[in-house]
Image (cartoon, helix red, strand yellow):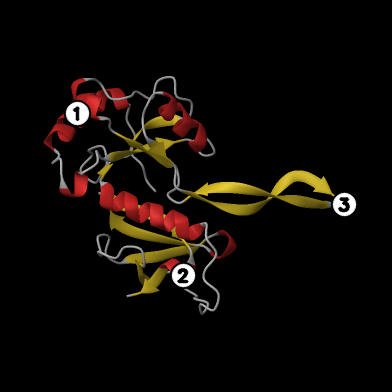
Amino acid sequence: MNMAVRPIESDVQALVAKAEELPRSGEFQLLPYYLLAVRSWKELDVVDSYRRRGFRAFWPNYQVMKPSRVVSNGRRALCHRRVGIIAGCVFVQLRQSDHASPLPMADGILGAFGPIRSHNGEPLWIGDADVRIIKLIEAGLNTPPAPGLPAKTFKAGEKVRFVDDVEARWGAGVVVRLALQGRIVVEIDAMGRKTEITVAAHQIERT
C-alpha cells in the first residue's frame, strides 16, 4: 500500500476539527479510528505503547508458519508468526477528551511513522462499520473454515466481494496476488484510498 506519511504534529488541528464535525450517533456512535503507518514487525510494540498512553489501538493480524533461524537435522524449524491483514498499519481510536487537547504524537513511540492519508491528502479516518468488517475478516483468517465447504481457487485479476461486507460498503475488489498458505490479497478502493487486504479463500466470492 502506497502510504504518504507526514509527522502527526502537523495534523493535530485538522484532526481535532474533523472529529468535532462527526455526528454522535449512527456510523460514528463510537469515535473513529485513524490509520497509523508503522514499521514492519513493530506493530504490537506500537499498539502496546498507545494503550499505555490510554488509547484504544489494535492491529488486525493472522498467524502463519514460517521457517525460523533455528536449524535442526539440517532443516530449518518452523515457527508461528503474526502477519498484518493490512500491511504496515495499526488502528488508533480518538478519545473524547482529545477534542480539547492535542492528539497523541508519534514522538517516543518506536516504529510509528505518522497517519496514512486518503486520496485528497487528509489523515485517513474509518468508522464503526469499517472496523467491524476488518475484525470479522481477522476472526475468519484465524478460524479454520467449516468442514465440508468446497475449496475455492482464485486468480489474479478476478473481481471479488468480501463475504463479511454484508452491507456492500466496500464494493468489489480485485485479486492482486496469492499470499502465504492459501491466503489471498485483494485490492479495494475503500476507506478513502486503494487498500490491499489479506483474506482466506472462504471469505470472498466472485462478483
Examine the rendered structure and indicate whether residue 128 appears above or below residue 165: above
Disc ID at residue 134: none
Among the 4 quarters of the image, the one containing residue 7 = top left
- Report how far apart the C-alphas of labels 3 and 2 lie in the structure: 37 Å
Q: Say what secondary structure mark 1 lies in.
A: helix
Q: Please, which residue is most extreme toward the right here?
A: 73
Query: Is 28 on the left-hand or right-hand side of 157?
Result: left
Task: Mark 3 vs mark 1: give the one in front.
Answer: 1
Residue labelled with disc 1 = 16
Left or right, 54 with reference to 26: right
Q: Nearer the viewer, residue 64 or 9?
A: 64
Residue 73 numbered mark, or none? 3
Residue 202 x, y percent position in the rendering:
46, 70
Question: Please, what is the three-letter code of the amino acid marked with disc 3?
Answer: Asn
Q: Classify mark 3: helix, strand or loop.
A: loop
- Of labels 3 and 2, earlier in sequence is 3
Q: Amino acid at mark 2?
A: His
**In contact (CB < 8 Å): disc 2 and disc 1:** no
Q: Residue at x 30, y 67 (%)?
A: 172
Query: Of the residues under marks 2 and 1, which one precedes in the sequence?
Result: 1
Query: What amino acid type should be assigned to the residue bearing mark 1?
Result: Val
Which of the numbered marks, if any, corresponds to residue 202?
2
Q: Is residue 139 above or below residue 12?
A: below
Q: Is residue 207 above or below residue 191?
A: below
- For the residues marked 2 and 1, what is the alpha-carbon distance in whole angstroms? 39 Å
Residue at 49%, 59% in the rendered image: 141
Distance from the alpha carbon under mark 3 to that under mark 1: 57 Å
Residue 158 in view here: no
